[in-house]
Image (cartoon, rainbow, N blue to C red):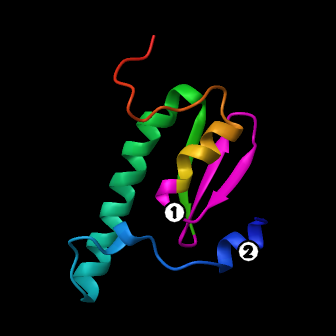
Amino acid sequence: MCGACGILAGAPDWVEGAGVGPGAEGGAARLMERQRRIALVNRLLAPSGVHLRAFGGRLVLQSATGRTKIVTELAHVWRAADEIGRRPVDPLELARP
């Protein structure tokens, strides 16, 4: 998918509204929760040299060499990170050498 289609397509990820009510407080809580999830994912991605950030409602992965992938959902992060990272990512792996 090209970058333009990645920004324009899709609905919010199902995890975006989990446990958060409507209104201004709900919006702030959703943003804080999204940032928390991104920080956790970045800890798992660190050995691969890939960094995740939010941009315009989408998720952007960038490698240390500048390769970039736009994904629409958290579930797509792992495959994209495998494509552009130094090594495959296994989010279930407990210890890394």
Foreground: 60 or 9?
9
Q: For the residue carrying disc 2, how many other residues have a C-alpha within 10 Å: few (<14), some (14-19), or many (20+)?
A: few
Foreground: 73 or 27?
73
Helix, strand or loop at label 1? It is loop
Range shown magenta: 56-75
> Which residue reaches farthest bottom?
23
Helix, strand or loop at label 2? It is helix
Q: Which mark is residue 73?
A: 1
Q: Residue at x 62, y 49 (%)?
A: 61
Q: Which mark is residue 5?
A: 2
Location of residue 51 in the rendering, given as x and y in whole percent from the top left corner: 56, 42
Picture quadrant of residue 16: bottom left
**Residue 36 in the figure: left or right of residue 41:** left
In the rendered image, residue 2 lying in the magenta stretch gets the answer no
> Which residue reaches farthest top?
97
Residue 14's place in the image compared with 80, above or below, is below
Location of residue 12 in the rendering, given as x and y in whole percent from the top left corner: 47, 76
Q: For the residue carrying disc 1, how many other residues have a C-alpha within 10 Å: few (<14), some (14-19), or many (20+)?
A: some
Q: Which mark is residue 9?
A: none
Q: Residue at x 47, y 32 (%)?
A: 90
**Residue 38 in the figure: left or right of residue 24:** right
**Residue 8 in the figure: left or right of residue 73:** right
Residue at mark 2 to residue at mark 1: CA–CA distance? 14 Å
The three-letter amino acid code for the residue at tag 2 is: Cys
Q: Residue at x 45, y 10 (%)?
A: 97
In the rendered image, residue 68 lying in the magenta stretch gets the answer yes
